[in-house]
């Protein structure tokens, strides 16, 4: 069950509340007894897998050339 803590009290206990949330507790922050926000632990970061879409996109030789060709002088000027 979540504990409800008024914002005024949370100001003085913020470090302890954050530590409790980090350990898995859910804490509801309230203003005048009305729930306003929820303090919860962050979800663990997922490791990103490089190349997970490899082989799903097929490009023609013309499309590959267009994507990899050097920029013209005019195109380069647009980036300056």
Image (cartoon, helix red, strand yellow):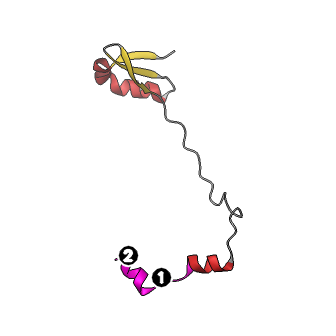
Tell me the magenta residue range: 68-80
Task: Indicate the secondary structure of the residue bearing disc 1.
Answer: loop
* Vertical comparison of 68 with 11: above or below: below
Q: Residue at x 40, y 81 (%)?
A: 76
Q: CA distance from mark 2 to mark 1?
A: 10 Å
The earlier-in-sequence mark between 2 and 1 is 1
Mark 2 in CB contact with mark 1 (< 8 angstroms): yes
Q: Is residue 23 left or right of residue 76?
A: right
Name the foreground residue: 22 vs 34.
34
- Which image quadrant is residue 45 in? top right
What residue is shown with label 2? 79
Q: Residue at x 36, y 15 (%)?
A: 34
What residue is shown with label 1? 71
Measuring from the top left, give residue 29's x and y in whole percent. Answer: 38, 21
69 part of magenta stretch: yes
Where's the C terminus, which quadrant? bottom left
């Amino acid at each position: 069950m979540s504990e409800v803590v008024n914002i005024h009290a949370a100001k003085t206990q913020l470090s302890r509340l954050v530590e409790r949330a980090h350990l898995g507790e859910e804490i509801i922050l309230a203003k005048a007894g009305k729930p306003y926000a929820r303090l919860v632990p962050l979800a663990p970061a997922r490791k990103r897998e490089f190349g997970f879409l490899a082989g799903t996109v097929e490009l023609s030789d013309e499309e590959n050339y267009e994507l990899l060709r050097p920029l013209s002088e005019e195109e380069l000027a647009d980036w300056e």
